[in-house]
Structures are given as C-alpha cells and as structure tokens.
Image (cartoon, grey):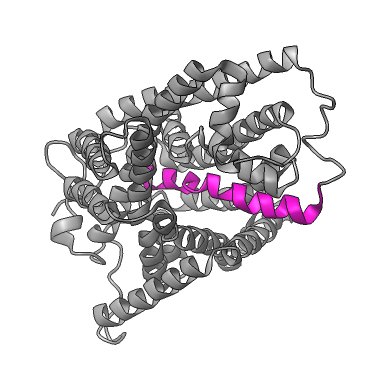
Amino acid sequence: MTEDATRLSGRLSLTSVVAFGISYMAPSLVMVIFGVVAATSAGTAPTAFLLATGAMLLTALSYAKMAGYHPAAGSAYSYARRSIGAPVGFLVGWVVLLDYLFLPMVAWLVQSVYLNAQFPAVPVWAWMLINAGLTTLVNVVGLALTDRVNKLLTGVAVFLVVLFAAYCLVHLGHHAPASYTRPLWNADSGLAGVSAAAAVAAYSYLGFDAVTTLSEETRDARRTIPRAVVLVIAVGGLLFAAVAYVMQLVHPGGVFDAPEIVGYTMSVQVGGQTFADWTNLAGIVAGFGSGLAVQLSTSRLLYTMGRDGVLPKRVFGTLNKRTGTPVLCVLATGAMCLLGLDLSLETATSFINFGAFLAFTAVNVCVIVHFVRNRRTLTGARKVLGHAVVPALGACVTLYLMSQLSPTALTIGCCWLAAGLGYLVHLTRGFRRPTPEMAAS
C-alpha cells in the first residue's frame, strides 16, 4: 500500500482546528454545570473555572510541545509510542480508546435526553439513532463537509452562550448586584471548596486534546496544532469563566433549589419562558456539533491504531479512495450508539474520565522523557521550566483529578487497562515479538 493510500491529507486551517476543539468542549456546558460548580465553591464559580483553566493549561502546553515534535494523528497514543516505547504507547492508546469510543456515545446520549425532554413523544433510543446517524453521514461524506457544518454549529453554540450572557447583563442593569467581587471570593469560600469545584469544572475541558488527532489533516501541523491546543483551552476557559461570573452576579452564593437545571431556570429569569425554551432547543441543535467533532477525532484514533497494526488493519487502517477518510472507522464509531440505547447518562460518563486523565498524565511524562533524552540541546532555565517543571506539575494535577473519580470509573478503567495488557501479551506472543511499529513516521 502506498503512503498516499495510508496518509490523511492536510486541509484544515488554524480556525477550523480551533472550531473543532471548541465544539468538542461544548460552549453551553458552562450553563449546564454552573449550579454544581457554584454550590461546591460556595458561590465562586468563575474562580473555580479560572483555576481549572490554569490547571488544564499545564497539560495543554505539554500536548502543544509533543504535537510540534510528532505531528501524527494518534495524539497521546503516538506520543507515548515514539517517546517512551511501543508497549507503553500501546497501553496508553488502549486506555485512550476507552475514552474515545464512549465519548461519541455520551455526546449522543446527552443530546437525546435533552431532545426527549423537549419532544417526549419521541423516545430517547430513537433520538440516539437519529443523532448518531446524522453525524455519521456527515463524517462519511468527507472532511470538507464536516468542517463547514462544524464551523456553523460552533458559531451557533457560541452565539447562544453570548446571547444568554447579554440577557443576564440586561437583567443586572435593572437589578444591580450588591458586590462585583463576591463571585470571585467571599466570606463563605475557601481553598478546599474552590479546588473541589475546579476538579468538577475540569471535566468541561475534556476533549481539548482531540485537536491533535487532526494533525495529519492540518496544514503546517507542526506550527498549527500546538497553537490550536493552547487557543482551545484559553478561549474555552475564558468563555466559561466570563459566563460563570455573569451568572454568579445574577444568582449570588451557592444555594440552589435544583443545581442541575440552573441554566434553564436562569434563562427563564432573565428572558422569560419563551426565550428559555427557544434557547434550550437551539442549544440542543448546536450540541450536534459536539457529537460531530467527537466522532471525527475518535475515527482518527481508530484509523491510526489500525494503520499501525494494533487493530485489524484491513478494517481500521484503510482510507476510502473517494473521500480520503477512514469510512469504516467512522461507521464503527457510529455503531457505538447501540451500546448506549439502554444506559443511563451517569453510567455512560463513568467510562470516559479514567482514560482521559491517564492520557493527560502520559503526555506530561512524554515531555519529561523527551527533555531527559535531549537535555544537551534543551539547556537554559526556560527549557527546564517548559520541559520539566511545567509537565511535572501537569502530571500531578491530572493524577489528582483521576483520584477524584468515582469508584465505578476507577474500577472500569483498571479492568479495561488489564484487558489491554492481556491483549498486548497476545499480540506480542508473550513479548517474544515486538509491538507493531508505526506504519509511517
């Protein structure tokens, strides 16, 4: 098979890649989890989001460095293979696979639950099939269409969040808050509460790393992808913090009747029932973009692992000659919706966080390993800070976040990791054969 037949083509611009990252993170998510974050932080949600942004930025800088060194579509999987070794890379890829395989299912399930609430005559399982079918169709047609649709939906999602914030500001014009600093820190807040809230808010940033899976489809990837990773965290984090600040001004403190639906009740408060209903519906439509971006990145990880021979190459390691995309990988990802037809949202989300935080930790370690191996050329205080101190802090943060996961998530993650180790032993015939190497460097 020629290299052209096994390499994705670079078409995406910086704007396109950033749009995919922002869409993946779902801009309206701040409205969904605001109540929980505010309650945990005793009414200092914007501070919690800022702390989470800073914490995740540490890992984003590590992803940016590795994307510059290794502009491959496999993200953490590729970085670990090339920096630490093929067996470790395989296990990282296997764990990330748990995250990436179930993220599309979770995105479709969230979308379907909200659509069912808006249109109860259509059951959740039917909405699941509709959502998964539509995103799969767009991703199968080709990257150009996916890029255009995603930009449109990302624009709609950001507009809706900004419109909601504008209504909040108009409301504040008629109901001036007693204090503009209380949302940042108050007599009830403390470091422990804000840190715990930041750990909750950090889940909003899952997926910023997904833009690195588009490396082979991005123009000038060595320069574009690192910039995109940092921009996604910076833009998304500042948007989350700004909207949370305005929401916290509208509702000071952290006491709510129902923290899970504060975004909707606040929409009613500042804009009325009709505004809230239309905003909710439009937000659901915009959320389609998140599912689109999630499925795109998942299919690219499956393709890279298939191209390497870690997964069956004939199924996962081929590109469609007409579209230049891994169509079978997209279809396999779409089929994951069938597993979510009878799952609750809580059970589904428990599958994904373990893989994400373990991958974040692995990428931070990759930067440190790269520094140790190239320390003769990476000299100077700035190099040591960027290649040793910052990734070490990033690894500590992500390990802390992993420790905050539920026992269910940790159990599922460890069982999946054990299964991957068993598959690696089988693949290498008890480590007597080498782990399949990269198909193209």
User: Residue 19: percent from the left, percent from the top?
Assistant: 44, 31
Q: Quadrant of the N terminus?
A: bottom left
Question: In which quarter of the view is residue 192 placed?
Answer: bottom right
User: Residue 323: percent from the left, percent from the top?
Assistant: 16, 36
- Of residue 366 and residue 122, the one placed in the foreground of this image is 122
Q: What is the span of residues highlighted in magenta in the rendered image?
A: 189-214
Residue 216 visible in this rendered orientation of the protein: no
Above or below, 107 against 247 in this view is: below
- Of residue 244 and residue 145, the one placed in the foreground of this image is 244
- Residue at image x 33%, y 40%? 112
User: Residue 95: percent from the left, percent from the top?
Assistant: 40, 65
Q: Is residue 423 left or right of residue 62?
A: left
Residue 89 visible in this rendered orientation of the protein: yes
Above or below, 428 against 83 in this view is: below
Above or below, 268 against 319 in this view is: above
- Of residue 42 and residue 134, the one placed in the foreground of this image is 42
Q: Is residue 4 left or right of residue 105?
A: left
> Is residue 100 shown in magenta?
no
User: Residue 433: percent from the left, percent from the top?
Assistant: 26, 82
Q: How many marks?
A: 0
- Of residue 311 and residue 12, the one placed in the foreground of this image is 311
Q: Is residue 370 left or right of residue 313?
A: right
- Residue at image x 70%, y 26%? 250
Question: In which quarter of the view is residue 306 placed?
Answer: bottom left
> Is residue 191 shown in magenta?
yes
Magenta span dominant secondary structure: helix
Q: Is residue 270 left or right of residue 360?
A: right
Question: In which quarter of the view is residue 394 placed?
Answer: bottom right
- Residue at image x 27%, y 29%? 144
Q: Quadrant of the C terminus?
A: bottom left
